[in-house]
Amino acid sequence: MLRHSSDWRTALWAFVFFPLMGFMPYVEPRVVPWILPLSLYFGFCAGVFSHNHNHCPMFKSRALNAFYSAWLSVFYLFPTFVWIPTHNLNHHKYVNKAGDATITWRYSKRHTWLIASTYYFVSIYWQAAPIREYVQKARGANPRLMRQIRLQYATVFGGHAALLALGIATHGVRLGAFVYAFGFLVPALFANWSMIFINYIQHVHTDPWSDHNHSRNFCSKLGNWLVFNNGYHGAHHESPGLHWSKLPEAHAKIAHLIDPELKQASIFGFCLKSYVLGALSPRFRTRQVGRAPYDPPAGGPLMLETAAVSAVDVGVNVSMA
């Protein structure tokens, strides 16, 4: 059923570990403090899988892909189709330049923890327009796509309502809300926030005009095993449809062409250096590599409007399978 045999591990995480971690607090609420780091990790993976699935669908079957999209939507706390208009068709086209809904420099060219951690709210605000237009276009021109969109919305809201009701029915209102929150809600919120945070640090102070310095990479082998090679972001941008299992090889081919500053060992090390040590001394903070995204080679006025309509016009014919 899988298009790539390496996705057996994706399926194990998604269909076994995601629900297992979610329901453990329902069985024994006292485990919450002990499993919270793991719950957040699997929440992060839910975001990674949503991203990967919309670039390279996991199953051969269209019906299974639609089911998997709806399944992931519960653990991502948002319908996963939103990756299509905002990421696949917009971010990958403009890559942190004007027109990208997720530009890192919209309100500030600085890079601090406060800016990075609150970038989520900026990003979701500006992503709303292309999502809205994508849904409107699908409603008028692609009934099958619209059915999948409705299914995902129904799964998210219906699924979380049922999970909350289950917690209350088994543990009462207060404890039931607690087990639901730490079993499903908090990991899903983290999934949503962490994907936007990761997008920020993968592009802040990079050079979108460069062939290979447009993205920051995190190259730890163990780290990439844990996050399904999400750290090899440059190779992903250069071959968006490439399956995650092939990214290490693709990265190796271009690694010597990437600025050393954009090849970090790990996300945790980068955050420690940038946000903890960087708060103590400017020399640990990131600096612009190459040409800034707000400095187009051709010059001229810089328009910050999100390029929504053109991306959506392409997107109406894009299936979520």
Image (cartoon, rainbow, N blue to C red):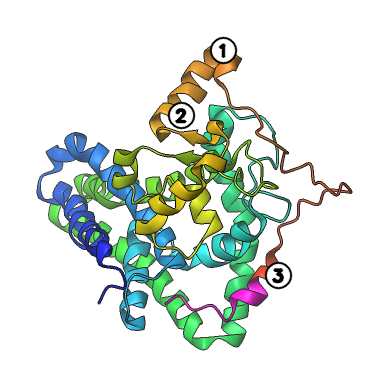
Residue range in magenta is 312-321
Rounded to the nearest whole Å, what is the CA distance between mark 1 and mark 2? Answer: 15 Å
Q: Do the residues labelled 1 and 2 touch (CB within 8 Å)?
A: no
Name which residue lies at 67% across and 56% down: 94
Q: Which residue position is annotated with label 3?
A: 309
264 relative to 243, above or below: above
283 relative to 63, above or below: above
Any mark on residue 289, and which? none
Q: Which residue position is annotated with label 1?
A: 281
Q: Is residue 159 left or right of residue 97?
A: left
Q: Are marks 3 and 2 in contact (CB under 8 Å)?
A: no
- Give the mark count: 3
Q: Which residue position is annotated with label 2?
A: 270
Q: Is residue 7 left or right of residue 274?
A: left
Furthest toward the top, the residue is 280
Furthest toward the right, the residue is 300
Q: Which amino acid does label 1 sit on?
A: Ser
Q: Which of marks 1 and 3 is in front?
A: 1
Q: Do the residues labelled 1 and 3 touch (CB within 8 Å)?
A: no
Q: Which amino acid does label 3 sit on?
A: Val
Label 1 SS: loop
Q: Is residue 230 left or right of residue 20?
A: right
Neighbour class for label 1 at 10 Å: few (<14), some, many (≥20)?
Answer: few
Q: Can residue 78 be seen in this view?
A: yes
Magenta stretch, main secondary structure, is loop
Name which residue lies at 14% across and 39% down: 31
Residue 319 among those drawn in magenta: yes
Name which residue lies at 54% across and 77% down: 318
